[in-house]
Amino acid sequence: MQEPQFDFGMIGLGTMGRNFILNVADRGFSAMGLDLDQKKVQALEAEGKGKNVGGTTKTADFVAALKTPRRIMMLVPAGKPVDSVIESLLPHLDQGDLLIDGGNSHFLDTNRRDRTLNEKGFYFIGAGVSGGAEGARKGPSIMPGGHKNAYEIIRPIFEAAAAKVEGEPCVAYMGKESAGHYVKMVHNGIEYGLMQLIAEAYDLLQRGGGLNNAELHQVFDRWNKGKLQSFLIEITAEIFKQKDPVTGGELIDYILDRAKQKGTGKWTSQNAMDIGIPLPTIDAAVSMRGLSALKAERVAAAKKLTIPMNNILVEDKAIWIEQVEQALHFSFLVTYSQGMAMLADASIEHKFDLDLEAIARIWRGGCIIRATILESIRKAYSADPDLKNLMVSDEFAPLLLAAQAATRTVIKKGIDHGIPLLALGSALHYFDAYRTARLPLNLVQAQRDFFGSHTYERTDQDGVFHTEWEV
Ligand code: 6PG
């Protein structure tokens, strides 16, 4: 029997798992992979030639090869596969070994696994990992949650493997139980919001402004050098210049307008609803994926619900591009504000005790929503860790005030043109609702009391009131 020799084990050798192992090996740790698929093991061995990396299809060999306490990470599809892997692994493990779930697991599943594994004497970490295949290889943003002692076991490896911004690793302990997966869920909610907003800006520039793909590439490329600098704007610029090998045209024009989803954005909206947090831009993004799926209905409706409209809604392209940039910047700021406000409230609701500054810090690099804006967010929470909403911070308020007029212009023109702006509109409405001292919801309370005797509060006296409304 060979002496255990590997520092780190990975279960699931798909692209993400293989890339993460290679990343860990590049940082000076030895790493062992397990997958039932021999081809994936071979792929790892080929890609890991010359590195301190091994692979196997056998659980017993895998476990025996790892130094104790074992540090085993799973990158397998969320849901049942995670439970199956845990079940098959447990008989081989020793007390004190650490299991890490690096997938996009639902936070309630993570709470359950954390509890049951801890009861059995194992450590467990639910870690959000963001950055896709390239992030896994070069440095992702990692959001680990669970027992603090469990995090200490994996910390050196995670800190080495994570992306770095100004020398700081994009990983930090998020909090107990499912705090890490919860933060990753909200990350993905923000991701959904930003992606939908970019898609709406594309519509405004292309259908509204008549820009072709080459011009769109130039515009997004320029935007990426300014206040909108971010990973998502960067890849959007690249997308517009990708050629289609089949037709010789531009690939974007041949991609079906039906966006799929694995569900993390929806979970964000669902949990926000459950704990009473308004997230309209993220909700809108989830709804637009739903609307995009209704392709056949939309094609039929386009023939029936026709409205005569001008094709081009702008006279001066340069001004229009500048206004859309401002609207996109405004709505990006609002979307981050909604996501961070959710984390602030959820931290209390779920008792996570989240450090919002640390979250902004580790999102500055490696992850899908990385952007220059994150540094302003970090500063805002550094100045006031109890900040309720970023929109009123000294970092965000002046930017929102500066961009709101252009945002209104863009939305008005878009509406006149029949361009659906569910996310952009919701961002402006959220901003307007949040800064409205007296909303018309007094009427909703009156209606509730009228038909259901649900009572209401008054503006001039404390207490709970009911009126016998006259009919
Ligand atoms: C990331 C991504 C990643 C994945 C999304 C895609 O942070 O690296 O968010 O987790 O690409 O799950 O989500 P949808 O399939 O729901 O769009």
Image (cartoon, rainbow, N blue to C red):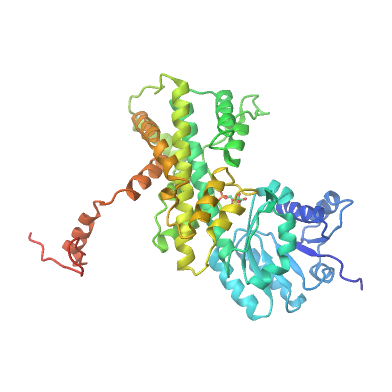
Quadrant of residue 84 within the rendered picture? bottom right
Residue 85 in view, yes or no: no
Residue 275 position within the rendered picture, expressed as x and y whole percent measured from the top left: 41, 63
Residue farthest top in this picture: 315
Which of these two is toward me, 332 or 102? Answer: 332
Residue 379 image offset from top left, x and y in percent: 53, 50
| Residue 408 drawn at (x, y percent) | 36, 35
Whether residue 208 is situated above or below residue 234 in the rendered picture: above
Return the x and y of residue 327 as percentages of the image width and height: 44, 36
Q: Note whether 163 is above or below 108 in the view shown.
A: above
Which quadrant: the N terminus?
bottom right
Can residue 111 be seen here? The reply is yes
Which quarter of the figure has residue 424? top left
189 horizontally vs 275: left or right:
right
Vertical placement of residue 454 versus 142, above or below: below
Q: Residue furthest left?
A: 470
| Front in this rendered view, residue 244 or 135 | 135
Q: Quadrant of the C terminus?
A: bottom left
Q: Is residue 128 left or right of residue 189?
A: right
Q: How many marks?
A: 0
Q: Residue at x 55, y 32 (%)?
A: 223
Taking the view exactly as shown, the residue that stands out farthest to the right is: 1
In this picture, residue 252 sits left or right of residue 201? right
Look at 74% across and 77% down and name the residue there. Answer: 91
